[in-house]
Image: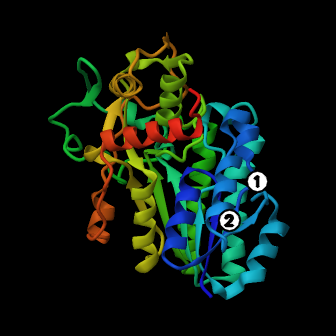
Amino acid sequence: MSIVIVTGSAGLIGAEAVRFFTGKGMDVVGIDNDMRQYFFGEGASTRWACERLCRDFPSYRHESVDIRDAAAIDAIFQRYGKDIAAVIHTAAQPSHDWAAREPVTDFTTNANGTLNLLEATRRFAEGAVFIFTSTNKVYGDTPNALPLVELETRWELSPDHPWATHGIPEAMSIDQTLHSLFGASKVAADVLVQEYGRYFGMKTAVFRGGCLTGPGHSGAELHGFLSYLMKCAVSGNRYTVFGYKGKQVRDNIHSHDLVSAFWEVFQAPRSSAVYNMGGGRFSNCSMLEAIRICEELAGRPMNIAYQDGNRVGDHIWWISDIRAFQRDYPDWRQQYDLRRIMEDIHEGCREREPAI
């Protein structure tokens, strides 16, 4: 028996990982207590995704456990022990805006929860591959100091900058910057995962994600940019753009493409690996560009409001340089470009809310 533990298993990346690894013939144990509903309200609940997983995959085992509960986490890991082949840790408080409301909840979820999982892996399944979904917010607002050029629909990195062709590499410093409290808690978790690899020799990988997206996202105003944008486009609800003239740029990676990268790591793990991971130059857009695509797919203008103030620590421009991962895992390929991602999200919105 080969077990994969997936935390945040009803979330966007977690549910994708459950489907993917189950499809590879592995047994999956999911850990998810729908904290997303607590963070963002009933509309962001992942209950529907959990019910779908339990229905579609009879072998899937679900544990409604909070990752902050070290004793409960230990009990799960002790039960499966050395049968655990991989831990895919996607559970988190994911919003830098929300973190300021309850800093203790944010930090204990993101940092302490990660520590609990690392310790349980070390004690009961030390040979397991530990894969962690970090965030580009570990770089704080340092990307905003890059020489940016304002174009008609987006900000863009000056073409004479060495990062202009491929995006921002892992060489960017994470120090001396405004992270937001969310960014700080994810830095702590990110460094812990690296350290357990270096200090204890565990097989760990950190993915510093750009905009992770797909039809399985329960998008909310404070988290899930493309998903929530499309939800508003389909429903007619107002969407508020925060600052930067709506020209802020994100690279976007479909959940399937990200989880297929996890699979590559699982097959050939390293220790303390760190990768920037997003759509890169293959898949990126500004807010204005995304709004235009949403309007095309929904067949009507969106209800858009604009506020001058940007979110604290928010990036003006982010495109991931994903070449480090591609060098280590040359067989990996992205399948979803921006248009295909948006069409997939639109179809998912209509499937879940057919009356809209």
Which residue sits at x=76%, y=43%? 105
Quarter of the figure that contains the C terminus: top right
Q: Is residue 133 visible?
A: yes
Q: Amino acid at mark 2?
A: Gly
141, 126: nearer the viewer: 126
The outermost residue toward the front is: 355
Q: Amino acid at mark 1?
A: Asn
Q: Is residue 13 above or below residue 131?
A: above
Q: Is residue 204 visible?
A: no
Circle 1: is it few (<14), some (14-19), or many (20+) Cα within 10 Å? Answer: many
Is 184 left or right of 100, judged from the image as shown?
left
Is 104 left or right of 301, judged from the image as shown?
right
Q: Is residue 139 above or below residue 78?
A: above
Q: Is residue 140 above or below residue 172?
A: above
The kind of secondary structure element at disc 2 is strand
Based on the displayed image, in which of its 4 quarters is residue 269 positioned?
A: bottom left
Indicate the position of residue 183 as horizontal and vertical percent values.
Answer: 57, 42
Which residue sits at x=38%, y=26%? 248
Which residue sits at x=44%, y=71%? 263
- For the residues labelled 1 and 2, the Cα–Cα distance comes to 10 Å
Q: How is the image coloured?
A: rainbow
Label 1 sits on residue? 33
Label 2 sits on residue? 30
Indicate the position of residue 189 as horizontal and vertical percent values.
Answer: 61, 56
Quarter of the figure that contains the N terminus: bottom right
265, 101: nearer the viewer: 265
